[in-house]
Image (cartoon, helix red, strand yellow):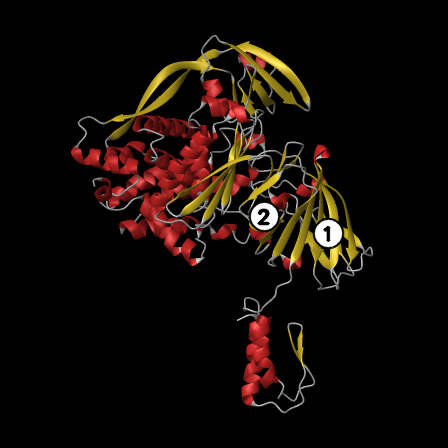
Amino acid sequence: MPKRDFLRVLCGPLRSLRLKAFYCKGHKIESQRTPRKSHLLIACACFLFFCLPGAPGFQSPVVHYTVSLANPASHRVHVRIEIPPGAAQRELQLPVWNALYQVRDFSQYVTWLKATDAHHRPIPSEVIDKSRWRVTDAENGAAIEYEILADQPGPYGAQLNAQHAFFNLAEILMYPVDLRSAPVRLAFSDIPAGWKIGTAMSSIDTHTFSAENYDRLVDTPLEIGTFHEAEFDDSGGHYRILVDADPPDYDLQKITGIVRRIVSAETAWMNDRPFNTYLFIYHFPRTSGGGGMEHAYSTAIDVNARVLADNALALPEVTAHEFFHLWNVKRIRPQSLEPVDYTKENYTRALWFSEGVTNTVQDYMLIRAGILDEKQYLNRLAEHIEQLQRRPAHLTQSAEEASLNAWLEKYPSYASPERSISYYNKGELLGVILDLAMRDASHGTSCLRDLLRWMNREYAQRGKFFADSDSVLQAAEAGTHANLKAFFQNYVAEKVEIPWDEFFKTVGLRLVRSTSVSPDIGFEAARIFDAPPVVISVRTDSAAQRAGLNTGDSILQINGQVASSDFQDKLSALHIGDSFRLRVRSAGVERELQWQVGSREEVELELKDVDNVTRQQKLRRAAWLKGEPEKEASR
């Protein structure tokens, strides 16, 4: 019933109340009569309808944001926040982190801030700490305006330039601390001619959007510009694809076909589709770039244009990964990440599962979608094992510890092989061997898919968060009815060497080690998300050291090509004796280095059939590669 009609029904009986006045959410009802019990009950009903948060008639105060795009050439965004009446002193917080597990202090880009009251008169504002401001005399409402620089490209950034705007909104929008849970309205002004807005956010009109609160607002990125788009429907879901890139660099029809195959495979595998509409935002920059960022109803993905052209798996693998995050991370979510604390780090031990096992599923889904075949998958899997085993830190850092230390990833020294492992890498491998262990313990009736479906039912669909590794263990045991505590203790919490062949023999495979003479470039490098690769170690007496390469150098080009997400592939393609050129930057100074590729002995790994593979091993391998229990896979 509309509030006006509900109030009219109540007014008659309430007039019998002997009260000077009755107030309900701004509605005043006069009365002079003595109240009866029934009248008091009606008054209580009115209070419940209009006054309690969550009640049908409750009107929460709304925070209004207006973002001006008037200055794309200077990358400066003008923000206006209108806050409703409330306390005289109000505090506003700009997050110190978003999109990455890195404190990046976005307040470094704020150039000025001022505040006015409801009558447009200046009111005092002051800085409390590096990312928080206080305004006073705001009891009747206030408007806070500020300017912030936005020129961080990629899916983890916020950028306004002459070509487009892309915003992770937590990086440019402050929130009133007392109104973080309040409804939000976001409007854009001064939009360049011909630009349009793409987002999964609810729209009020073409330039205005709404969100239930600040958290939902900043979990919904926007692409604003002259992007191209496509859309399709699949199994009841509507999918939109937006691409901001040079048209010669991509084939939108081909991309749409890839995306359709992936979303079809993943929604069927999870037997769930927790949305009606989902948005993919793609950028294909010609400069260094790469990576993806998951959101509840959308994802933003960068693939370097050359990588897109050269590597057929580059777009499918990041798409499969980010789309599966709509379950694992966004809905099947660790309690340790909730509520999000925008003022400091949120520590969790579960990234090995939330990120690493998402990698596991990513490759399973590429197989199901017909994008990856068995040979390619087994080769990739052996390479990932090789990657882990070559890092001495796999004996000193556990998967849970790597998860906790995610906040150190912005420091190049942390990426050295002696210091850390990757929770993506080990987590993916843990997902594979946990899957094989579950199949073995249940005689093929339970697998990783059942674990994720169970967690989806028990946590995501009930609006609950899971308790890090303990809940993953519980889910694995629920599906297998077996005791898997030793598995989690040894390989997740501790640093026990993984006996690979014990797990792979169940599917008729073994890990074969061979020694070969391999090209040696003389250094190790790591890429932190979408940043250029950074040199983390240079071998003593190597040609790289003699050429002048130093730890901490950022790699800009490899043999004249941009060093992007495929930089390791470029390095792996080198041969002994090749001439090798690097353009690097250090302390703002660029320099060109050149030397010849050397050689060294290395252990290489390959997954091969065991002798005399049995029928049962073949059946289990087929089921494993389909991501299904054996009975389903044999149909």
What amino acid type should be assigned to the residue bearing mark 1?
Answer: Trp
Residue under pointer 2: 218
Q: Are marks 2 and 1 in contact (CB under 8 Å)?
A: no
Q: Residue furthest right?
A: 121
Is residue 577 placed above or below 603 in the rendered structure?
above
Who's the residue at 32% across and 24% down the image?
Answer: 606
Mark 2 or mark 1, earlier in chain? 1
Who's the residue at 67% across and 33% down the image?
Answer: 161
Is residue 439 placed above or below 58 in the rendered structure?
above
Q: Quadrant of residue 436?
A: top left
Who's the residue at 33% across and 19% down the image?
Answer: 514
Give the percent coordinates (x, y) of residue 334: 46, 50
Mark 2 crowd level (few <14, some 14–19, many ≥20, 10 Å Cα) = many
Q: Nearer the viewer, mark 2 or mark 1?
A: 2
Between residue 609 and residue 30, name the one nearer to us: 30
Q: Secondary structure at mark 1?
A: strand
What amino acid type should be assigned to the residue bearing mark 2?
Answer: Val
Q: Quadrant of the C terminus?
A: top left
Q: Secondary structure at mark 2?
A: helix
Q: Residue furthest bottom?
A: 34
Is residue 46 placed above or below 85 in the rendered structure?
below
Give the percent coordinates (x, y) of residue 532: 58, 27
Between residue 78 and residue 337, name the one nearer to us: 78
Q: CA distance from mark 2 to mark 1?
A: 19 Å
Give the percent coordinates (x, y) of residue 367: 33, 33
Q: Which mark is residue 425?
A: none
Residue under pointer 1: 133
Q: Quadrant of residue 162?
A: top right
- 461 vs 543, left or right, is left
User: Taking the image as drawn, is residue 352 in sight?
Assistant: no
